[in-house]
Image (cartoon, rainbow, N blue to C red):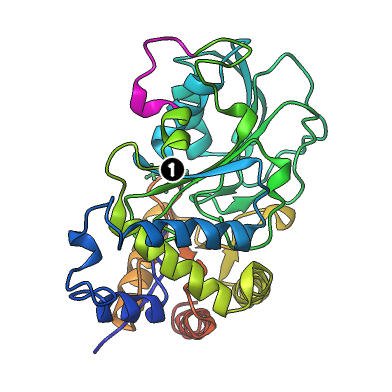
Amino acid sequence: MKRVFNFSAGPSMLPQAVLEKAASEMLDYNGTGQSVMEMSHRSKAYKPIIQKAEALVRELMGIPDNYKVLFLQGGASLQFAMIPMNLAKKGKAAYIDTGTWSVKAIKEAKKYLTVDVIASSKEDKYTYIPKVDKVTGDYDYVHITLNNTIVGTKWNTLPDTGDIPLIADASSNILSEPLDVSKFGIIYAGAQKNLGPAGATLVIIRDDLIRTADSPDGDLPAMVPTMLRYDTHAGEGSMYNTPPCYSIYVMGLVFEWIKEKGGVEAIGKMNREKAAILYDYLDASTYFSATTAKDSRSLMNIPFVTGITDEAKADEINKKFVAEAEAAGLVNLAGHRSVGGMRASIYNAMPVEGVKALVEFMKNFEKNNA
Ligand SMILES: Cc1ncc(COP(=O)(O)O)c(C=O)c1O
């Protein structure tokens, strides 16, 4: 059996132990004679699967009791719309623009409310996280992209938003290191990076942000579709309609794996060590360099470039790098099309051996091409 080190930004590597467990249970889950894929979501066998996934993520992230955990569909992209649809009361929200995914969130939000972009690092190609100390204003919420998958930055110091709910897209760094959930109104993430297979979206939402027909501020506008109301899903334990059953099951296995590894604290330590191996090499190399400001560096997505200034030549070398890496079993290292260069996504499931193998490969590539 051949397994590669997959540096894809998502969908991405899953822990081998999780894949093996899922494979062993594929035809007969827990003596039911069925695969989890074939089960009714309302069956006696399935209910404990979703309940266990929720209990584990609550335990791992220390999610307070006044938050709901929802397993939804539509990806993080649907949250770009659901958030303003459900949270707009005063009709104004603040967004911080840190790259492509923030831009998409902003574009969608503008359909439902007035958006103030209160900070942006666009003028510097999003290579850093803007410093935002305190946010004040008549805002329904403040939105940030906690980890920027494409440019490889992450928030290290959260803005102080006082009583204004802070909403975070944590698609590419959820469960990568400890996070104080109580600082946020909503945390959301597509599953396909650190959580499991694509198909499910995890939403952690504070109870007071779930508007219902009985809310003191009145109900949501009637035009908000039932499926896009948080209270629909919160009221039915993510079972209003058929949830992404199999994706949730694998998420549960991933949560178990994280727990076995020592929890998010231990995973965070491993992720810092993994990222340091690559950043230290990039900082020392005279051929490759990291593209992001040191105080904003992501632990999960690490873009890098050669110093070649001739665009055509750089392009050619980048292609050569990606092809030779692939032949060496290190796949999906091309940078995002909007940034160029290379990018290594080293999510929780990437073992330290994968990062070491990449650095060894880069050292050789540097020697042969510099
Ligand atoms: C930070 C971030 N937000 C949002 C998205 C979009 O997620 P989805 O494809 O689940 O809609 C991505 C996808 O890569 C992402 O990295």
Q: Is residue 49 above or below residue 104?
A: below
Question: Front-most of 356 and 270?
Answer: 270
Q: Is residue 315 left or right of residue 138?
A: left
Residue 228 part of the magenta segment: yes
Quadrant in which residue 20 is drawn: bottom left
The yes-or-no answer for disc 1 within 8 Å of ligand 1 is: no
Q: Is residue 163 above or below residue 24?
A: above
Q: Secondary structure at mark 1?
A: loop
Residue pictured at 68% horizontal, 40% vertical: 184
Residue 307 seen in the current view: no
- Give residue 305's position: percent from left, percent from top: 51, 61
Which segment is the magenta one? 220-229
Q: Is residue 232 above or below residue 115?
A: below
Q: Quadrant of ligand 1?
A: top left
Residue 170 seen in the current view: yes
Q: Is residue 98 left or right of residue 362?
A: right
Quadrant in which residue 335 is drawn: bottom left
- Give residue 5's position: percent from left, percent from top: 39, 78
Q: Is residue 229 left or right of residue 159?
A: left
Near mark 1 (Cα within 10 A), the count class, few <14, some 14-19 or many ≥20, is some
- Chief SS of the magenta region: loop
Residue pictured at 43% horizontal, 41% vertical: 76
Q: Which residue is mark 1?
A: 237
Task: Indicate the amino acid at tag 1.
Answer: Gly
Residue pictured at 82% horizontal, 30% vertical: 134
- Give residue 248's position: percent from left, percent from top: 37, 57
- Give residue 18's position: percent from left, percent from top: 38, 76
Question: Front-most of 9 and 47?
Answer: 47
Residue 367 part of the magenta segment: no
Residue pictured at 45% horizontal, 55% vertical: 310
Q: Is residue 274 above or below residue 164?
A: below
